[in-house]
Image: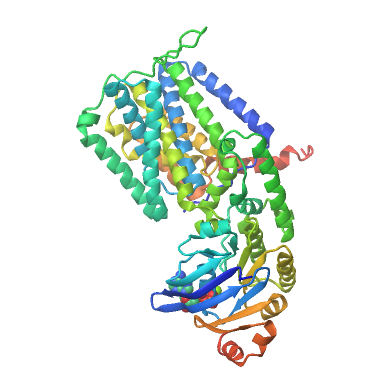
Amino acid sequence: MMARTDQAFMMPPSRWVGYLVALALIVAAPLVLGTPYWRGILVVCAMNVLLALSLNLVLGYTGQLNLGQSAFFAIGAYVSVILVRSHGWNFWLAMVAASAAAGVAGLLLAAFAVRLRGHYLGIASLGFAVITYQVLVNWERVTEGVRGIYGIMPPPPIVLPGLPEISFGNSLALFWLVGGIAFVVYWMLDNLVRSPVGETLRALREDEVSAASLGINGARWKAFAFGLASTIAGLAGCFYPGFVGTLVPDAFNIVESFTMLAMVIVGGMGTMIGPVIGAVVLTFLPELLRSAGELRLMIYGIALTLVVLFMPGGILQLVQIVRTRLAPRADGGGSR
Amino acid sequence: MSALLQARDLHKRFGGVRAVQGISLEVEADSVFALIGPNGAGKSTMMNLLSGTYQPDAGELVFGGVSLAGLPAYRRARLGIARTFQKIRLFRQLSLLDNVLAGFHLHHKVPAWQYLFPAAAFWRDWRTCREEAMALLDFVGLADRAHERAGALAYGQQRLLEIARALATRPRLFMLDEPAAGLNGGEVEFLLGRLREMGTRGITVVVVEHNMELVMNVADHVFVMDHGEYLFQGTPAEVQANPAVIAAYLGGEFA
Ligand SMILES: Nc1ncnc2c1ncn2[C@@H]1O[C@H](COP(=O)(O)OP(=O)(O)O)[C@@H](O)[C@H]1O
Ligand SMILES: [Mg+2]
């Protein structure tokens, strides 16, 4: 389908520096972008990073064309809200259950991935997202259908002994929470894809027949990738309703799957940092161009088309090209 | 002692094509078994049946006393069956090193949680796998190119890399489908040496080959197929002298 860039091998020290810089950025970003509006954008950005990371695990590392990731985002959002509102669950417990529910739904889609390849899997996963959307619209007794659910509270405050209560009613704390979770998820996935698990998933992406000849059970490892990826997407979904305050099916239109796809591919799929860059750029670009409405999708479409046509490795590829162009000059021994 | 691998009356057809018709064979442990025959004789189909890439329409397969009936390829790899492909199937976008590392899939002894939070056992495994992978790349003469992309290798080198990757599974039985195809003279010599070396390491080799010189040099036993059927088997000398084999060769498009 589309070319993938290889996972860059970084030395451990530079990894630690990268992590520290990322942490510093997460802490500083909402202090620099101090208005409630921009802090809200940051929360959305953190959720998009989680979604892009999750899709990339399936698409970039395991090579499975998944056009239905919005379904798992939706399942996380709805299950967490329904458990809290209708069944009186504690939010944090509901979060765990909702993520798990999304993960189980992911296993269901993995069952298709075992039988279907490439375009066919893409179509099946798209169908999966359409069905999920229709269930949200039509199962009114549980989901309230298109009327939607209103007055959803943000996550309850965390009370730690000896510290002031941490309330998530403002987007500053909420961003630190979701951004912190995105950081931890990134860190764990980064370890995972560098481990033998990553070797196995990439082998599966490159060639299933020879992967099987090495003892790799394709069905099992696809289920693993889909299950983990949809759990992460479900986790992102848990924070969405409390942030917006309402929950309607239209937030999980299949177009949302397309925006996730755009973030992964524009950033550079099959790498860890690429989809993060894609999520950040495609969250902020429409805002900077003051066109959050209809134009947002147009920008995503144009970015996606340009990348696929001219730079299949995404923004990360561009960065690497620039770096190699500059490298000889940097250590060229002062030729100027 | 009975044979390491026994096939009884294997059949496989593709639509109207009877690719394999009633083949029975026995591969003795620690031997080099060559499977030869003209193009389209059904040799690759036999490989696919033995490795589990295809399942036979009829017939029995026993490996080390275990029936292989219905076992998919990945389960057979666990039993110690490794293979290469006639049409090379490398992980083209991955480095040579990563290709071989994927071959250790069955041999990692790391608690699962350490894949998320690497600790001592993870790093021990990480180091030994890389050392072994480099040793295997060295075995096929590609150690100095470990970090290049597999797809960038020349054809003959890709075949050698596929051998290194398969050896990473630590096979009992190693099946190679036309390993010398596309190799130059020097590379064929090198391959010959490596096949002999595998024999001394306790690996039983099944090799499908067009290159007669190679077959006659390394094989302990030669099995000849033609049009999906059994034609003849014996020592290399017996096969070379057999009129039916010679006729099949002259009739077929053999090199
Ligand atoms: N996957 C397949 N689908 C259809 N026909 C096949 C397939 N594999 C092999 N055949 C046919 O089976 C016969 C034997 O092929 P093969 O086993 O590749 O022969 P060899 O390796 O001895 O050259 C040929 O006629 C070939 O066209
Ligand atoms: Mg063949």
From the viewer's perspective, tell me whether residue A136 is left or right of residue A269: left
Q: How many marks?
A: 0
* Quadrant of residue A72 within the rendered picture: top left
* Quadrant of residue A128 within the rendered picture: top left
Q: Quadrant of the C terminus of chain A?
A: top right
Name the foreground residue: A145 vs B223. Answer: B223
In the rendered view, tell whether residue B5 sits above or below residue B139.
Answer: below
In the rendered view, tell whether residue A218 sits above or below residue B89.
Answer: above
Name the foreground residue: B177 vs A178. Answer: B177
The residue at the point 31 percent across, 37 percent down is A253
Residue B67: x, y in percent?
A: 51, 64
Q: Is residue A35 visible?
A: yes
Residue A151: x, y in percent?
A: 28, 19
In the rendered view, tell whether residue B60 sits above or below residue B81.
Answer: below
Ligand 2 quadrant in view: bottom right
In the rendered view, tell whether residue A253 sits above or below residue B74.
Answer: above
The residue at the point 53 percent across, 77 percent down is B24
Residue A98: x, y in percent?
A: 37, 30
Residue B204: x, y in percent?
A: 65, 67
The residue at the point 67 percent across, 80 percent down is B212
From the viewer's perspective, tell me whether residue A180 is left or right of residue A106: right
Name the foreground residue: B158 vs A203. Answer: A203
